[in-house]
Image (cartoon, grey):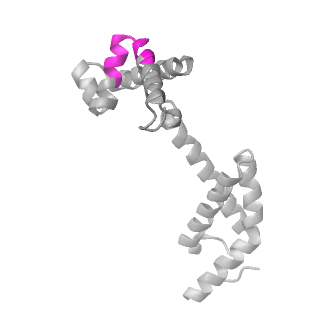
């Protein structure tokens, strides 16, 4: 049961402990529903919800039902913010898993891996090879490459994405 706010550090800690004990399970259940059963994500969001409650403890209502509504609102908004953040960022593109490439002392394996990479690069168009070379070998940023080519940065990013996808397909075929 929550009491009237006590301004001492011990009183704040006691109130936060009671808040967590009384409402964390209900908030976690809500977060599990909102994250479609992703337990790790739900637990992370619960922790962030409780952290915000601690930081704004004076804003959390003293009445238990109102406190639960406040916590659920914060949790729901955190889920919404996470979804918006993921929508605003492009999907991360990774090169092919290179763990299969043998160690430096395996000359046969190295030769086969080199052949596979050369074959996959050979299947790319000259423009795709050039773009991947500029971004990954030379180390230029997409903005620099866009300036050099005279195209928008979004075009460079999408062309890089498709070139990587074509390279990945070529390596999988090899």
Residue at the left extreme of this rendering: 148
Q: Quadrant of residue 124?
A: top left
As drawn, is 39 to the left or to the right of 169?
right
Q: Residue at x 62, y 58 (%)?
A: 44
| Residue 160 pos. (x, y %) | 40, 23
Q: Quadrant of the N terminus?
A: bottom right
| Residue 144 pos. (x, y %) | 25, 30
| Residue 170 pos. (x, y %) | 50, 17
Relative to 35, does residue 95 appear above or below in the rendering? above
Q: Residue at x 44, y 15 (%)?
A: 119
- Residue 142 visible at all: no
Q: Is residue 120 found inside the magenta-colored segment of the image?
A: yes
Relative to 159, does residue 6 appear above or below in the rendering? below
As drawn, is 67 to the left or to the right of 106?
right
Magenta stretch: dominant secondary structure: helix
| Residue 103 pos. (x, y %) | 46, 38
Instruction: Please count the marks in the image.
Output: 0
- The residue lying toward the viewer, choosing from 131 and 40, is 131
Q: Is residue 41 found inside the magenta-colored segment of the image?
A: no
Highlighted magenta segment, given as a residue range: 119-132
Relative to 53, does residue 100 appear above or below in the rendering? above
Q: Residue at x 66, y 71 (%)?
A: 61
- Residue 99 visible at all: yes
- The residue lying toward the viewer, choosing from 42 and 77, is 42
């Amino acid at each position: 049961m929550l009491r009237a706010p006590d301004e001492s550090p011990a009183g704040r800690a006691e109130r936060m402990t009671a808040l967590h004990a009384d409402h964390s399970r209900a908030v976690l259940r809500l977060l599990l529903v909102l994250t479609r059963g992703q337990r790790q994500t739900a637990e992370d969001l619960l922790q962030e919800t409780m952290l915000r409650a601690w930081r704004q403890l004076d804003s959390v209502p003293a009445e238990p039902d109102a406190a639960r509504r406040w916590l659920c609102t914060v949790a729901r908004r955190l889920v919404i913010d996470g979804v918006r953040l993921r929508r605003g960022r492009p999907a991360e593109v990774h090169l092919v898993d290179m763990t299969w490439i043998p160690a430096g002392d395996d000359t046969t394996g190295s030769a086969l891996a080199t052949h596979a990479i050369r074959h996959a690069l050979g299947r790319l168009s000259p423009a795709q090879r050039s773009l991947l070379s500029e971004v990954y070998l030379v180390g230029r940023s997409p903005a620099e490459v866009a300036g050099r080519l005279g195209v928008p940065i979004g075009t460079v990013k999408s062309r890089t994405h498709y070139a990587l996808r074509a390279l990945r397909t070529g390596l999988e075929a090899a």
